[in-house]
Structure formats: C-alpha cells, structure tokens
Amino acid sequence: MLFLRGLYYRQGIKACRNLTFNNMKRAYLLLLSVVITSLVLDAQVKVVAHRGFWNTEGSDQNTLASFIKADSIGCYGSEIDVWLTTDDELVVNHDKKFHGLYMETAPFDKIRKIKLKNGEKIPTLDEYLAVVKEKPATRLVLEMKSLTDYSREDEACHKIAKLLTKYGVLDRTDIIVFSLNAAMTFKKIFPVGVKIFYLDGDLTPKKLRKLGLAGLDYSVKVLKKHPNWVKEAHEQGLEVNVWTVNTDEDMKYFIDLGVDYITTDHPDRLLKLMKDKK
C-alpha cells in the first residue's frame, strides 16, 4: 500500500516540475489519483464486538466486562441488547427467555437474581452506560429488542433516549432495531445525526433511504443473497453492517465486498486478520 502511494506521488510531483499548458491536466489527474488512492487504501472495515467481547476469559455476553474488554482490544464499537421489563426497568440481555424468565414479562427483582458466567448480575442500562461513559474510544451499538406492544416499545425508546442523554453518550451511540415502529419512534425523538439502522433484512436500500434511516444492518445470509445491496446502499448514502460474521472466510468475503462494519463474536480474530491484510 505504501509503495502504491509513493509511486503515484512521485509521478505527480514529476509532472508538476514542468507545468506547461499541455501537461497541467495530466499533473492534476495524477495528483488527484494520489488522494483517491490514499482514501481507498485507508478505508477499513470497522469492527463491532457482538454482545461485547464476551468470548474471552472473565467475560460473558452483555456484561459490563464485555464492553471493557472490547474497548481494551481496540474495537470500533461494542453491541448490546436492551429489554424493557414488565415493571419498566431497562436491562441488558439478549435472550427473550433467559434462565426460565421472559425478559419482557418478568419483574426486575427476579431478573436481577440471575448470575452470569463471569459472576456478574444482569446489568441495568443505567449501570452499563456509566461504564460506556468512561470508555470514550469505543462506540456503543444499542439494539432495542422488539416488544409485543407498540406502546411499550415507544415507552422503551423514550427511556433509552433519556438515559443516553443523561450520560452524555448519545453522540457516540448507534441504534439498531428489528421493529420499524421502534425505528420511527427513535427517529422522532433523536436529533438529526443519530444513526438508526434496520436489522430485519426485508427492505431494500432504496426503501431504507426513503424512511430516513442511516443504513442496513443485515445478517450474513441476507447479504450473501443480496450482495448488490452493499453497492446500492452506498449509492443511496447509507452505511452497511453485517452480522454475525464468525469465520475467517466470511470475514474476508465481507471485507472485500466493501461493508462499513462487521459484527462478530470474535473481534480479536477479525482485528488480527485485518492487520495481517495490510
């Protein structure tokens, strides 16, 4: 990569030393190519740790430790899942049913008694954001889990927005949702510039653009079926994330496809693979 930059640079400078009318256009194009080539070569997929960096010692999915560990290895972002309990507490956990309890219908005091593999309890979003605030180098990717009642979804959206504002992390948080209702509610609440991505995989980039969303956040299966959506999304001014990418083969495939973000259970491996490809 450095060799290519140097080659284009030397050619451009050589042309500039003799700037006659006839070679001005050539010099301009060569120097422009230096800028474009540098931008292309510097473009790099951003690594998002799926449910935090949990696949390592002392961690577990959606724990406080998982965010701290994602930050420690230099991830661009760390993803979490947020539920609204029946008694209006926002908790960080992925599964709809976990240890025999349904996150949406169980009271917080029962959920709180669950002990995770690394010894932590299921954190509240309030507790989680306190940690996020202290790790400004790592972006938060927050998935609000779909609820059976749209009015409850709306309530959850407002509660999440309030906490993100309270901790001053709204400007470094991306929102991801399966529910279009939640997406539109967040869009009404948040100021312009807060990124909201759609997860379900059933809408084209053009349709997402019309909805005013920041991009698509689709599964490996969906984007392998529709690889052209990556280019189409970029043409629409949208960004593209793919989840959950766990094999080296798929990591290389989506890097070459030109996605903006890759969400993985193995962020350490992806970071190493990207470093080795330079």
Image (cartoon, rainbow, N blue to C red):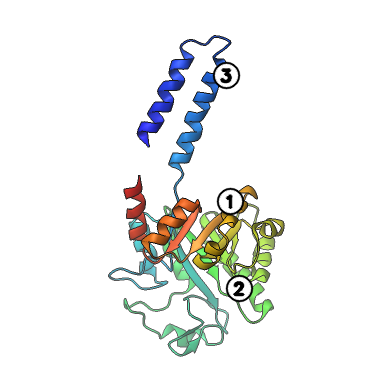
Q: Secondary structure at mark 3?
A: helix
Residue 248 location (% of width, % of height): 36, 60
Residue 108 location (% of width, % of height): 50, 84
Residue 239 location (% of width, % of height): 57, 53
User: In the rendered image, which residue does mark 2 sit on?
Assistant: 156
Residue 77 position by quadrant: bottom left
Q: Residues within 10 Å of mark 3 (few under 14, many from 20)?
A: few
Front: mark 2 or 1: 1
* Upstream in sequence: badge 2 or badge 3: 3
- Please determine whether, in this image, residue 84 is positioned above or below residue 229: below
Q: Quarter holding the N terminus? A: top left
- Please determine whether, in this image, residue 104 is positioned above or below residue 278: below
Q: Residues within 10 Å of mark 2 (few under 14, many from 20)?
A: many
Front: mark 2 or 3: 3
Q: Secondary structure at mark 2?
A: helix
User: In the rendered image, which residue does mark 3 sit on?
Assistant: 25
In this view, the residue farthest toward the right is: 210
Residue 162 position by quadrant: bottom right
Residue 222 location (% of width, % of height): 55, 66
User: In the rendered image, which residue does mark 1 sit on?
Assistant: 231
Q: Residue at x 48, y 60 (%)?
A: 140
| Rendered image: mark on residue 134 | none
- Please determine whether, in this image, residue 110 is positioned above or below residue 231: below
Q: Secondary structure at mark 1?
A: helix
